[in-house]
Amino acid sequence: MPDPHACPDRASLGFAQEFGTGTLIGTAPQESLAIRNGSVADLKIDDVTFSGDSAFTVTAEPMTPATIKGNKYMYLRVVFAPTQAKQYTGTITMKSNAVNYDGGVLQFPVSGCGIPADGGASPCYRDGGTP
């Protein structure tokens, strides 16, 4: 492939939501989203932005603007630090010269749910109550 292609390792990022679980209030787990340049041509990342709940912090490594060589990676590190028992959402937007995304714009939904440390009612549980 002579044109730059962005190849993320997943389409979205969710924090501890398997089986109706969530993230304890007061903790701050981290997840990473890996984006590989699937081409020999340089992938130029112009900007990475985040919109949504302030419980999420997003950091790009390397910092933008950045040039990712062929078959090399960029990482988006996301920290989730919930302060309330509720659902949190947001969107990471990456602007690049990737030809496999419309206008070179990739968007990744981010989600998480804060749960109380005492095991009280949480919106994460399927029935909306306690586990």
Image: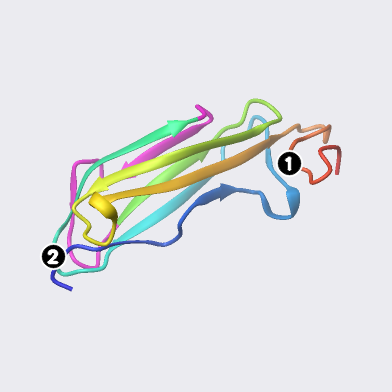
The three-letter amino acid code for the residue at tag 2 is: Ala
Q: Is the C terminus in the top left, top right, bottom left or bottom right quadrant? A: top right
Looking at this view, name the residue that lies furthest to the right.
130
- Tell me if 96 is positioned left or right of 110 in this view: left
Label 1 environment density (alpha carbons within 10 Å; few <14, some 14–19, many ≥20): many
- Residue at 19%, 41% in the rendered image: 65
What residue is disc 2 on? Answer: 41
Range of magenta residues: 53-73
Q: In the depicted view, which residue is nearer to us: 104 or 55?
A: 104
Q: Earlier in the sequence, mark 2 or mark 1?
A: 2
Residue 34 location in percent, x, y?
A: 38, 57
Does 43 appear above or below 25? Answer: below
- Residue at 15%, 69% in the rendered image: 40
What residue is disc 1 on? Answer: 124
Label 2 environment density (alpha carbons within 10 Å; few <14, some 14–19, many ≥20): some
- Say what secondary structure mark 2 lies in: loop
